[in-house]
Protein backbone atom coordinates (compact mmCIF):
# COMPACT_ATOMS: atom_id res chain seq x y z
CA UNK A 1 0.00 0.00 0.00
CA UNK A 2 1.46 3.40 -0.96
CA UNK A 3 2.18 5.91 1.76
CA UNK A 4 -0.33 8.77 1.74
CA UNK A 5 0.42 12.21 3.10
CA UNK A 6 -2.13 14.82 4.08
CA UNK A 7 -1.01 18.38 4.74
CA UNK A 8 -3.22 20.75 6.71
CA UNK A 9 -3.59 24.12 5.00
CA UNK A 10 -4.71 27.02 7.21
CA UNK A 11 -4.50 30.58 5.94
CA UNK A 12 -2.87 32.60 8.78
CA UNK A 13 -5.60 35.26 8.44
CA UNK A 14 -8.36 32.71 8.98
CA UNK A 15 -10.20 32.73 12.29
CA UNK A 16 -13.08 30.41 11.33
CA UNK A 17 -11.73 28.03 8.69
CA UNK A 18 -9.80 27.60 5.45
CA UNK A 19 -11.45 25.99 2.41
CA UNK A 20 -9.24 24.77 -0.45
CA UNK A 21 -10.93 24.73 -3.86
CA UNK A 22 -8.34 24.19 -6.59
CA UNK A 23 -4.72 23.38 -7.45
CA UNK A 24 -2.69 23.69 -10.66
CA UNK A 25 0.19 21.63 -12.02
CA UNK A 26 2.73 23.93 -10.32
CA UNK A 27 1.22 23.27 -6.89
CA UNK A 28 -0.39 26.72 -6.54
CA UNK A 29 -3.56 26.42 -4.48
CA UNK A 30 -6.65 28.64 -4.32
CA UNK A 31 -9.63 28.76 -2.02
CA UNK A 32 -11.16 31.00 0.60
CA UNK A 33 -11.03 31.59 4.32
CA UNK A 34 -13.31 32.98 7.02
CA UNK A 35 -12.25 35.78 9.32
CA UNK A 36 -13.89 38.42 11.48
CA UNK A 37 -13.30 41.30 9.02
CA UNK A 38 -15.99 42.58 6.64
CA UNK A 39 -17.98 39.72 5.21
CA UNK A 40 -15.65 37.19 6.69
CA UNK A 41 -15.03 35.51 3.31
CA UNK A 42 -11.80 36.17 1.42
CA UNK A 43 -10.17 34.34 -1.47
CA UNK A 44 -6.55 33.25 -1.21
CA UNK A 45 -3.67 32.03 -3.33
CA UNK A 46 -1.07 29.78 -1.73
CA UNK A 47 2.10 29.85 -3.82
CA UNK A 48 5.60 28.90 -2.74
CA UNK A 49 4.47 28.58 0.89
CA UNK A 50 3.06 32.14 0.98
CA UNK A 51 -0.63 33.02 1.31
CA UNK A 52 -1.96 36.05 -0.58
CA UNK A 53 -5.48 37.38 0.01
CA UNK A 54 -7.61 37.77 -3.12
CA UNK A 55 -10.37 40.33 -2.63
CA UNK A 56 -11.98 41.55 -5.84
CA UNK A 57 -11.77 45.34 -5.91
CA UNK A 58 -15.55 45.75 -6.34
CA UNK A 59 -16.60 43.08 -3.85
CA UNK A 60 -18.77 44.20 -0.96
CA UNK A 61 -16.72 43.94 2.24
CA UNK A 62 -14.22 41.76 0.39
CA UNK A 63 -16.59 38.83 -0.20
CA UNK A 64 -14.48 36.89 -2.71
CA UNK A 65 -14.11 33.13 -3.19
CA UNK A 66 -11.41 31.69 -5.47
CA UNK A 67 -12.31 28.30 -6.92
CA UNK A 68 -9.91 27.41 -9.74
CA UNK A 69 -6.42 28.11 -11.10
CA UNK A 70 -4.71 27.04 -14.31
CA UNK A 71 -1.04 26.50 -15.19
CA UNK A 72 -0.71 30.15 -16.26
CA UNK A 73 -1.83 31.29 -12.80
CA UNK A 74 -5.18 32.65 -14.01
CA UNK A 75 -7.68 32.38 -11.16
CA UNK A 76 -11.47 32.16 -11.33
CA UNK A 77 -14.10 32.43 -8.65
CA UNK A 78 -16.91 34.70 -7.61
CA UNK A 79 -17.62 37.75 -5.47
CA UNK A 80 -20.70 39.38 -3.95
CA UNK A 81 -21.72 42.98 -4.56
CA UNK A 82 -23.52 45.34 -2.15
CA UNK A 83 -26.91 43.88 -3.18
CA UNK A 84 -25.58 40.38 -2.35
CA UNK A 85 -25.57 39.33 -6.03
CA UNK A 86 -22.79 36.95 -7.06
CA UNK A 87 -20.58 37.65 -10.08
CA UNK A 88 -17.93 35.41 -11.58
CA UNK A 89 -14.41 36.73 -12.03
CA UNK A 90 -11.17 35.99 -13.84
CA UNK A 91 -7.98 37.28 -12.18
CA UNK A 92 -4.59 37.30 -13.89
CA UNK A 93 -2.45 38.53 -10.99
CA UNK A 94 -3.02 42.22 -11.81
CA UNK A 95 -6.54 42.60 -13.19
CA UNK A 96 -9.97 41.31 -12.21
CA UNK A 97 -12.48 40.78 -15.03
CA UNK A 98 -16.14 40.30 -14.07
CA UNK A 99 -17.91 37.43 -15.82
CA UNK A 100 -21.71 37.70 -15.89
CA UNK A 101 -23.83 35.42 -18.07
CA UNK A 102 -26.47 37.54 -19.88
CA UNK A 103 -29.95 37.45 -18.33
CA UNK A 104 -28.60 35.88 -15.14
CA UNK A 105 -29.14 36.97 -11.56
CA UNK A 106 -26.03 35.13 -10.34
CA UNK A 107 -22.87 33.79 -12.01
CA UNK A 108 -20.16 31.69 -10.37
CA UNK A 109 -16.98 30.70 -12.22
CA UNK A 110 -15.74 27.43 -10.71
CA UNK A 111 -12.89 26.12 -12.87
CA UNK A 112 -10.43 27.11 -15.59
CA UNK A 113 -8.28 24.89 -17.77
CA UNK A 114 -4.92 25.61 -19.38
CA UNK A 115 -6.64 26.81 -22.57
CA UNK A 116 -8.45 29.50 -20.59
CA UNK A 117 -11.87 27.86 -20.85
CA UNK A 118 -14.00 28.58 -17.80
CA UNK A 119 -16.85 26.48 -16.39
CA UNK A 120 -19.37 27.35 -13.74
CA UNK A 121 -23.05 27.90 -13.27
CA UNK A 122 -25.57 30.73 -13.28
CA UNK A 123 -29.11 31.33 -12.11
CA UNK A 124 -31.60 32.68 -14.63
CA UNK A 125 -34.36 35.13 -13.71
CA UNK A 126 -36.59 32.17 -12.75
CA UNK A 127 -33.86 31.06 -10.30
CA UNK A 128 -33.08 27.92 -12.31
CA UNK A 129 -29.44 26.81 -12.35
CA UNK A 130 -27.60 26.22 -15.62
CA UNK A 131 -24.03 25.15 -16.24
CA UNK A 132 -21.90 27.15 -18.65
CA UNK A 133 -18.69 26.81 -20.62
CA UNK A 134 -16.98 30.11 -21.34
CA UNK A 135 -14.56 29.87 -24.25
CA UNK A 136 -12.43 32.60 -25.80
CA UNK A 137 -11.60 33.98 -22.36
CA UNK A 138 -9.77 37.29 -22.62
CA UNK A 139 -6.22 37.57 -21.46
CA UNK A 140 -6.64 40.55 -19.10
CA UNK A 141 -6.16 43.39 -19.21
CA UNK A 142 -8.69 43.48 -22.02
CA UNK A 143 -10.34 46.40 -23.74
CA UNK A 144 -12.92 44.14 -25.40
CA UNK A 145 -16.28 44.93 -23.77
CA UNK A 146 -17.90 41.63 -24.86
CA UNK A 147 -16.41 38.19 -25.37
CA UNK A 148 -17.93 35.01 -26.69
CA UNK A 149 -19.39 32.36 -24.39
CA UNK A 150 -21.63 29.35 -24.86
CA UNK A 151 -24.11 28.58 -22.06
CA UNK A 152 -25.26 24.98 -21.88
CA UNK A 153 -28.97 25.48 -22.42
CA UNK A 154 -31.56 25.76 -25.15
CA UNK A 155 -31.28 29.05 -27.01
CA UNK A 156 -35.06 29.34 -27.13
CA UNK A 157 -35.10 30.05 -23.41
CA UNK A 158 -33.16 33.27 -24.07
CA UNK A 159 -34.98 34.49 -27.17
CA UNK A 160 -36.92 37.69 -26.88
CA UNK A 161 -35.18 38.88 -23.73
CA UNK A 162 -32.29 40.78 -25.28
CA UNK A 163 -31.35 44.22 -24.06
CA UNK A 164 -28.51 46.64 -24.64
CA UNK A 165 -25.59 45.23 -26.62
CA UNK A 166 -26.48 41.60 -25.90
CA UNK A 167 -27.51 39.83 -29.12
CA UNK A 168 -30.44 37.45 -28.93
CA UNK A 169 -29.33 33.85 -29.57
CA UNK A 170 -31.07 32.16 -32.49
CA UNK A 171 -29.54 28.66 -32.59
CA UNK A 172 -31.81 25.72 -31.82
CA UNK A 173 -29.50 23.78 -29.51
CA UNK A 174 -26.95 25.82 -27.62
CA UNK A 175 -26.82 29.57 -27.39
CA UNK A 176 -23.94 31.59 -28.72
CA UNK A 177 -24.39 34.81 -26.82
CA UNK A 178 -22.03 37.38 -25.41
CA UNK A 179 -20.65 37.63 -21.90
CA UNK A 180 -20.28 41.16 -20.51
CA UNK A 181 -16.93 41.80 -18.89
CA UNK A 182 -15.82 44.63 -16.63
CA UNK A 183 -12.07 44.87 -16.20
CA UNK A 184 -10.31 46.69 -13.38
CA UNK A 185 -6.84 46.67 -11.91
CA UNK A 186 -6.13 45.61 -8.37
CA UNK A 187 -4.43 48.44 -6.47
CA UNK A 188 -0.77 47.78 -5.75
CA UNK A 189 -0.05 46.22 -2.38
CA UNK A 190 1.40 48.58 0.24
CA UNK A 191 5.12 48.15 0.87
CA UNK A 192 5.96 45.68 3.65
CA UNK A 193 6.45 47.18 7.07
Image (tube, rainbow, N blue to C red):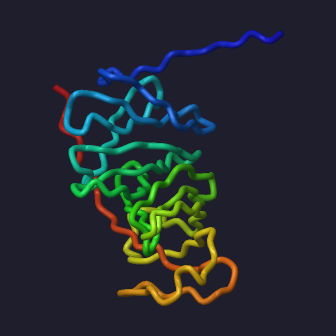
Query: Relative to residue 140, is residue 24 depicted above or below?
Result: above
Q: Nearer the viewer, residue 27 or 88?
A: 88
What residue appears at the point 40 percent right and 43 percent down from the top-left corner?
65
For this orientation, the residue located farthest to the front is 126
Q: How many marks?
A: 0
Q: Position of residue 138 (x, y in %)?
A: 48, 66
What residue appears at the point 63 percent right and 37 percent down from the top-left corner?
25
- Rendered image quadrant of residue 185: bottom left
Q: Nearer the viewer, residue 44 or 127?
A: 127
Q: Position of residue 77 (x, y in %)?
A: 44, 49
For this orientation, the residue located farthest to the right is 1
Which part of the image, by quadrant, shows the N terminus?
A: top right
Q: Position of residue 48 (x, y in %)?
A: 47, 27
Q: Position of residue 120 (x, y in %)?
A: 54, 56
Q: Nearer the viewer, residue 22 or 74?
A: 22
Q: Nearer the viewer, residue 96 or 164?
A: 164
| Left or right of 159, for residue 165 | left
Query: Relative to residue 143, is residue 8 depicted above or below?
Result: above
| Left or right of 108, for residue 33 | left
What residue appears at the point 34 percent right and 45 percent down from the top-left corner?
64
What residue appears at the point 60 percent right and 84 percent down from the top-left corner?
156
Amino acid sequence: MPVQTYTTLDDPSATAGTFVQGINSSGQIVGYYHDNQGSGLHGFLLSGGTYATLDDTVAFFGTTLASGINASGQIVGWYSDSANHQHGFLYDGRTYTTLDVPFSIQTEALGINDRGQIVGYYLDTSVHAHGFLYSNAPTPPSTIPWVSMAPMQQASTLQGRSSGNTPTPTANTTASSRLPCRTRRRPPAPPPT
